[in-house]
């Protein structure tokens, strides 16, 4: 029971933080919805684990709903790594572009 309460409080805290981030403009509506679905799913999983058993049976998985949780977690993690990799490549490109522009500007000043 204590673990359920702690996990629920953790999920609700993260929902609250995502609401604040959305209000501040620090996140997009799509990410807001995605993460809130994940946190709400976690809270439902803790309190009503049978829900995922029924969903797993409906999707043709074994009678254990934990499979759907595991598969979903793997997909989310792979997608997160993909997005982080894209963002990192973009940041590296922008840094390279800014450094080149700064060097070109410096060389032009020295030539004058």
Image (tube, rainbow, N blue to C red):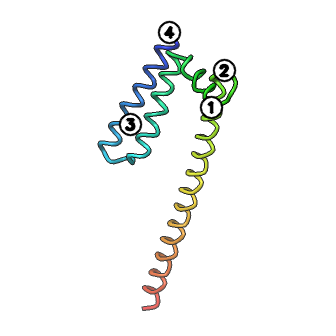
In the rendered image, the residue lying farthest to the bottom is: 112
Q: Residue at the spot x=58%, y=40% of the render? A: 76
User: Residue, x 42% and y 46% (percent of image)?
Assistant: 30
SS label for mark 4: helix
Residue 105: quadrant of the picture:
bottom left
Give the label on residue 64, or none: 2
| CB atoms of marks 4 and 2 within 8 Å | no
Indicate which disc, 1 or 4, sits on the residue closer to the N terminus: 4
Q: Is residue 49 above or below residue 82?
A: above
- Quadrant containing the C terminus in the rendered view: bottom left
Disc marking residue 18: 3
Q: Position of residue 71 (x, y in %)?
A: 65, 34
Q: Which residue is mark 1?
A: 59
The residue that appears at 45% across and 23% down in the rendered structure is 10
Q: In the image, residue 79 lies at what x, y percent?
A: 59, 46
CB under 8 Å between callouts 1 and 4?
A: no
Q: Are marks 2 and 3 in contact (CB under 8 Å)?
A: no
**Disc 4 marks which residue?**
2
Q: CA distance from mark 2 to mark 1?
A: 11 Å
Q: Residue furthest top?
A: 1
Question: Gap in Å between the C-alphas at discs 4 and 2?
Answer: 23 Å
């Amino acid at each position: 029971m204590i673990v359920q309460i702690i996990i629920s409080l953790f999920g609700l805290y993260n929902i609250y933080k995502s609401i604040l981030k959305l209000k501040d403009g620090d996140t997009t509506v799509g990410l807001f919805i995605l993460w809130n679905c994940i946190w709400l799913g976690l809270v439902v999983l803790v309190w009503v684990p049978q829900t995922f058993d029924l969903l797993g049976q409906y999707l043709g998985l074994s009678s254990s709903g934990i499979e759907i949780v595991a598969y979903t977690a793997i997909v989310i993690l792979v997608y997160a790594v993909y997005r982080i990799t894209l963002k990192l490549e973009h940041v590296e490109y922008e840094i390279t572009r800014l450094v080149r522009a700064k060097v070109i500007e410096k060389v032009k000043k020295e030539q004058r």
